[in-house]
Amino acid sequence: MRLLSRVAERLYWMARYMERAEDTARLTQSYSHLYMDTPEGADLGWDVLVNILDGQPAFENRFRVYNEQNVLKFLISDEDNFASIRQSVRAARENVRTTRDVLPEAVWEHVNELYLYTKEHAETSIGRRNRHRFLDEVQGRCQIVAGLVLTTMCRDNAFRFMALGHLLERADMTTRVIDVGAGALLGSGRSNQTIDPLIWGSLLQSLSAMSTYRRNVGPLPEAAPAVEFIFKDPTLPRSLQFCLNSIRGELKQLKHNEQALKTLERARRRLKRFNPAQASWQELHQFIDDIQVDLYNLGENINQSWFLTDPA
Amino acid sequence: MNKSWQSYETGPYYDELVTEAGKPRVVARRAVNMLQSLSDEEMSARRTAAELAINDMGISFTVYSEGENIDRAWPFDIIPRIIKSKDWARVSKGLAQRTRALNCFIDDIYNKQKILKDGIVPAETVLESGNYKEQCAGMSPLYGAWAHVCGTDLVRDRDGKFYVLEDNLRVPSGVSYMLENREITKRVLPELFENYSIQPVDDYPSRLHSTLAALSPRKHRRPCIVVLTPGIYNSAYFEHSFLARGMGAELVEGSDLFVDDDDCLYMRTVDGAERVDVVYRRIDDDFLDPEVFNPKSMLGVPGIMRAWKAGHVAIANAPGSGVADDKVVYAFVPDMIRYYLNEKPAIDSVKTYLCMHEKDREYVLNNLDKLVVKPANESGGYGLLVGPHSTKAKRDQFAKLIEKNPRNYIAQPTLSLSTAPTYAGDRVEPRHLDLRPFILSSRETWVTPGGLTRVAMVKGSLVVNSSQGGGSKDTWIVEGSK
């Protein structure tokens, strides 16, 4: 099947935005739960969520204080924050709108419904009362679309570029969650270590990995095994290892893949060398920074190898 | 009978579903009875269901307002328009004949110009028109087909007869809404279909595909067909995407295509360049090729005309087809049918007075209060005089304009557009409508069964354009006996 470069690009971004909306919803939800579970005075702060998504400059342009109301508004409904759930869904829909001809028909209907849903409900879902339901709904609807793609699309290039978008975004989100979450919440100088398992539980939850962790590792989430699991388990769909392996599988089937594969292999080697059990917070942070650079470069490689960057 | 229908009264017009005596027409009886048997709540629930379906299916059109593009839900009236297949057969035959003659005309104009030499059509009205593209002279596309997709606007006058109002030969739109309207009716009024045998419309995309495939310069099993769109901000983008999907063709923008040194057209894919055989273009001639037409165009493809003239790619509709899509040329279509086909026109045009002819001009000047006067080269109702609704000052102004530049004006009698029951607010009332069928031409000619019915949702209004508050109806061609 032939696939236009422009269409490939839009499918890729559609997948990234859908993944972003879903991941942000899950992250926000598990963090909200964590917040309710922690004893008063634990002082978790809402800025963590903004930091994970690298949204500080955009946030501070709009708001003065990092309180629950502002942060949730920023993440859920803010029209000026292009990474808010509402705007991610809107961007995903724009990309589907221009690629409907290569997607199963139901994909458009579901993405469009999701768009209408977020448009109608985002504003009123910032408060705790409706928040849970809204975030649940967003995740569920995103998964319907992902499921549709998985069960109805031919494994052709169109599918491949969507898969790349999903995987790259997911890998990115996984590393962010660990980096900022662990760094800010578990870093040095904290007094109350009794809530650590709660926090690790929440981080695992935000990656849909809690129950799998319990079955595979044990009932009590602890720092090193949790990081090991989230980064290196090759069977967990949101682990870094799984994402990188799957990206490799997709890249292998495309022509002109040399640059992208090279960058990918660099990231895979880096991950192989990394040992969470022996790493300090500092080293963990450095590792994540390096991986983020790899992922960024991979995005650039994809852009240059297959999209419409050079009209000649 | 529910309240919504109780006071339905036809005006002094032909009503599509109800007779002057207030009884449903035979062909519409079962549908009208069924709709009247619904409770008022049920009527309104069906309309809400239609609105929801339209939203969910994402059927929209784009309007420009205050510098912004707004994606609006497609306006739809749930009561279908029903036409007897026997009546339609006549119309359909007339449309096929008319389109054949128009294609003969375009082919003639860009080649031998026999019709001009024989004095049937005055040469200067054709050759001096902005729609005549000299760059197309000497081309003879396959099967002599230039306007491969034609959208012809019809109206039904007081006598119940269909008249051609205009031929759209450039990039006519609306066909996707014809298909979606049927889909919506199936969803919200499924019971209506039980008692009718209705000609299906949903094979249009495959008909369009075979029409286009027949034009491919390379003879292989699956020619590469693309739909060329100006992009997401075009008001008909929904349709471009719809048709590409329906045909399994690629939806492309100008930047996806390029012409190489071999004068062939290619598209950029993730596997590299791939040759294109047929372009169903939905952008105007002027924007098609910056090398030949408007040099500032960002929408087109530099060199595409070279590729076309070299015979390496087919373009539908062929560049230059607009030469037959002109208000003055319109007046000569019946003559063309006699001239090229040696047949009698099977569908009527609206009587048209050409002010360039002295006798016509005299009649027009004496009857300005009864006529609609249109400038020959403007479209979209700009600079129009509607006699019966005009002031003395306005008529005097137009009289002066006509005398100063008679070639630039035509006049037609004011028509009474037919009406049909339309669910407006909480009651069913008559509203005016027109009809746009689509005619496909390449190896064969094919006419859609029915077409897109557009309806003026505002009481008494004759404006059916969706950008100005017009709506639409599902249009049924039904077998008489069942």
Image: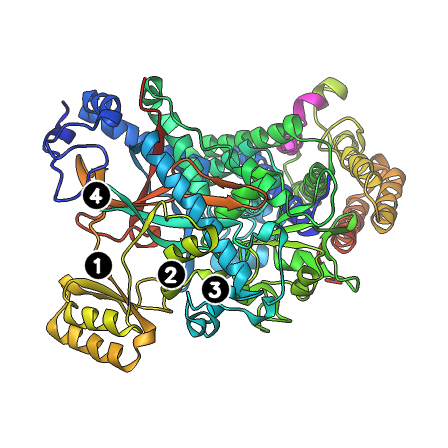
- Is there a contact, CB below 8 Å, between mark 4 and mark 3? no
Res A26 quadrant in image: top right
Of A299 and B361, nearer the camera is B361
* Mark 2 or mark 4, whichever is nearer to me: 2
Q: How many angstroms separate mark 2 from mark 3 (CA)?
A: 11 Å
**Labels 4 and 1 in the same subunit:** yes
Of B139 and A66, nearer the camera is B139
Residue B257's place in the image compared with B215, above or below, is: below
Mark 1 or 3, nearer chain start: 3
Q: Secondary structure at mark 4?
A: strand
Q: Amino acid at mark 3?
A: Ile
Q: Residue placed at 16% from the left, 33% from the top?
A: B19
Q: Secondary structure at mark 1?
A: strand
Q: How many angstroms separate mark 4 from mark 1 (CA)?
A: 21 Å
Which residue matches tag 2? B332
Of A250 and A191, nearer the camera is A250
**Labels 1 and 3 in the same subunit:** yes
Which residue matches tag 1? B413
Q: Amino acid at mark 4?
A: Arg
Q: How many angstroms separate mark 2 from mark 1 (CA)?
A: 17 Å
Which residue matches tag 3? B115
Part of the protein shown in magenta: A194-212
Chain hosting mark 2: B
Res A221 quadrant in image: top right
Image quarter of the C terminus of chain B: top left
Where does residue A262 sit, x and y in percent of width and height?
A: 88, 48
